[in-house]
Amino acid sequence: MVYKIVLYGNPVLEAKCEPVGPAEFGSHALKQLVADMFETMYAAKGVGLAAPQIGISKRLTVIDASAGENPAEQILLINPEILEKQGKLHEEEGCLSIPGFREPVYRAQKTRVRAQDVDGNWFELEGEDLLSRAIQHENDHLDGVLFIHRISPLKRDLIRRKIRKLQKAGEWD
């Protein structure tokens, strides 16, 4: 099932998410949610999607830096914790919840993350470049942080004003 992506302005996007609980691991409901999140991400042509972006305040993200080109690159991170960051990137980012807006954002060039899989098993993963950026971007979502919070106040204000105009015109729901 393809979910409707929640747009900037919805409070779920700026709230800290609750962890996925022990009783949820291995359940049909969790497995279906993960499958639906990948389907939603691909339908929106994204490389990452966090649960709050579909209105679910849970610490769960899906990532595919190949954008669906290589199914082996599908990554599921449940209750992720970033353990280490190295280096620096300053590259353009966008967000499925803030469509039509892109700005350069500083991120770590390498990231090591610890997370759980759908059955609750802990694992560690290292990402570089685009994958590192995606891990950090999606993890930010779980803490209620959007990429526009990581740009200058002036640029953020300009984007917010443009979004308000779109809302008034009924083009942003």
Image (cartoon, rainbow, N blue to C red):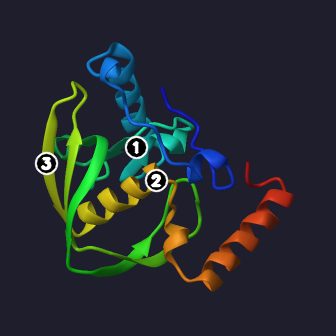
Quadrant of residue 156 in the image?
bottom right
Q: Amino acid at mark 2?
A: Asp
> In this figure, what is the number of numbered marks?
3
Quarter of the view holding residue 105? bottom left
Q: Position of residue 84 (x, y in %)?
A: 19, 65
- Using a 10 Å C-alpha cutoff, classify the residue at mark 2 as few (fewer than 14 neighbours), some (14 to 19) or many (20 or more): some
What secondary structure is marked by label 1? Answer: helix
Asked whether the beta carbons under mark 2 and mark 1 sit within 8 Å of each other, the answer is no
* Disc 3 packing (10 Å; few <14; some 14–19; many ≥20): some
Q: Which mark, residue 172?
A: none
Q: Amino acid at mark 3?
A: Glu
Near-viewer residue (158 or 72): 158
> Is tag 2's residue or tag 1's residue first in the polypeptide sequence?
1
* Residue 41 on image: x %, y %: 42, 43
Q: Give the number of the mark in front: 3 or 1.
A: 3
SS class of the residue under badge 2?
Answer: loop
Residue indicated by mark 2: 143
Q: What residue type is disc 1 on?
A: Tyr
In the image shown, does 65 or 9 lie closer to the viewer? 9
State the separation of the CA atoms marked 3 and 1. Answer: 24 Å
Write down the residue under mark 3. 124
Q: Residue at x 72, y 65 (%)?
A: 163
In 3D space, how far apart are the residues under numbered discs 2 and 3 (Cα atoms)?
Answer: 20 Å
Residue 64 appears in the rendering: no
The spot of residue 81 in percent (x, y) is 27, 51
Between label 2 and label 1, give the one nearer the viewer: 2
* Marks 2 and 3, the one that precedes in the sequence: 3
